[in-house]
Amino acid sequence: MDVTVVGAGPVGLVLAAELALAGATVQVLERRAEPDEAMKAQSINMPTAEALDRRGLLPAAEKVQREILERMGSFARMVGDRTPGEGRRAPDSRFTGHFAGMILDADLVDWSDPDFAAHTATDGARMVPQRELEALLAEHVARLGVPVRRGVEVTALEDTGDGVLVGTTAGPVRTGWLVGCDGGHSAVRRLAGIDFPGTDPELTGYQAVVDIADPEKLANGWVWSPEGVYRCGPQPGRVATMEFDGPPADLPHARLRSRGGTPMAPVTLQELQTSLRRVSGTDVTLTALRATPTRWTDNTRQAAAYRSGRVLLAGDAAHVHPPFGGQGLNLGVGDAMNLGWKLGAVIAGWASEGLLDTYDAERRPLGVWVLDWTRAQIGVLRGDAKSAALREVVADLLSTRAGTTYAVKKISGVTQRVDLPGDHPLVGRFVPDLWLRDGSRLVDHGHGGGFLLLDRTPDGAFARLAAAWAGRVSSVTDDHATPTGVLVRPDGVVVWASDTADATGIATVTGLEAALLRWAGAPSASPEHEPVG
């Protein structure tokens, strides 16, 4: 087995799929006997939606969003006559989100901003909750023939230099590479001896979907009180609370979990009702749980290294933080997309292990940003007078067109980039919606993975050069327009682009060839022509 992925959440499933598309043999081990039904992230950002799009999964994601909007519309109609503010409005399919509980008004966003305008094809696939995403991805890996072994827990590991010996509750496993996608209490991270520095938790949060006997006692939206914060909606029965009086009483069990102990006790209906009553100041009564509730804290940490020899980390195993806006899910999927093709390339033999060094280098800065973005929201959310004053300042900024546009651009991921060499503004960014003369988009031609090269030169000069990388690079020719050439990695990152109409220019061709050599390895065949110069 080339790779063993530990964890069958969205991150592990995306990684397993990318490895399979790259030709590696891969299996997934999952401690849970059944998929996790706990309520987690409720949406995905632009890079995640576009990752699904690149693999042909956009129609399935769009179907999920349509169903979610239908349920939200029913809830909005149910509460609209009694609740001011957002409850009176029909749900908006445009991705906005919130910052520290302050809803970002879609009407204030400058949707004509070039960063938004370049990424609109996936607008109908952003409201995809984590549970539905996991089910969608499980079908994807099944089609690719990837086995998912449930009820198997990792208990030991040994990096032998040429592989990893993994001890599990189902017996020993020998694998070439081991990737921990097993969450914040990662057994893989602990067993590999990778440090997990960060800041300790100060609050306890809950979220769940419930039946409420007297919903008129709760306001729709985010509400602050001296005891904390709560939210009701926008989905029917969805409630969330935050209390700033310290972490859960059984947090030590969570720490034991990271050393092989037992996890925190499940959230009960009574525990959730007690928190909601305390924060809301009402005697609201909850009658049933309709989804597995979650308990969380603001524990914020990042692994000291994303790789140790033949052991790697992705997703929450590499970084944890408060779950605001589903940033953890999206950050983890980005990790998997970045790592999948690189590890696949090393296994296929056309890239050296040095390529794996770019995984940590490219993903760590984004992880740092997400950790700080969520820490900032904790500072604004607290119920003390200083945080309340800060909240007023931030709310004032978010009431402006510029402020809301800035926040939504950050949350949606349209400004994400990798620090890569190159002067073209597309380099380092996720490939935009590039429509072709036949009505398709560039990404429609890459559902099987691999590099994509868009060639809009009159004589197909870029495609002829890339022919030497046959099997790794798929060239797509189109009518002349700008950009005239774009080279996209399997994870959607642009590594070379040109607006030059004259494709015989030395600098242009040399730049493409350098990018191909840097990212797609040595040529696998002789080019049809010699590069100019």
Image: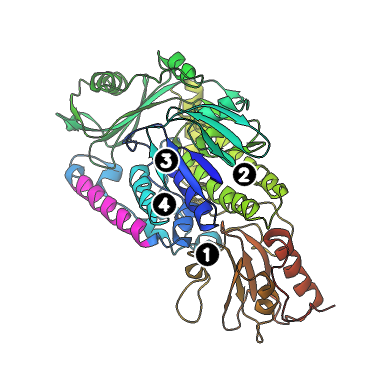
Task: Inspect the image, locate mark 2, and give the three-letter code of the amino acid beneath it.
Answer: Arg
Q: Which residue is located at x 76 percent, y 73 percent?
A: 508
* Residue positioned most to the right: 533
Instruction: Report whether 42 appears left or right of 1.
Output: left
Cα separation, mark 1 vs mark 3, equals 30 Å
Q: Residues within 10 Å of mark 3 (few under 14, many from 20)?
A: many
Q: Which residue is located at x 20 percent, y 24 percent?
A: 284
| Label 4 SS | helix
Residue 118: mark in rendering: 1
First in sequence: mark 2 or mark 1? 1
First in sequence: mark 2 or mark 4? 4
First in sequence: mark 3 or mark 2? 3
Q: Which residues are magenta?
A: 59-77
Classified by dominant secondary structure, the portion drawn in magenta counts as: helix
Residue 363: mark in rendering: 2
Residue 454 coordinates in the image, percent (x, y): 60, 73
| Label 3 SS | loop
Residue 496, by quadrant, is bottom right
Q: Which residue is mark 3?
A: 9
Cα separation, mark 2 vs mark 4, equals 24 Å
First in sequence: mark 3 or mark 4? 3
Q: Which residue is mark 4?
A: 141
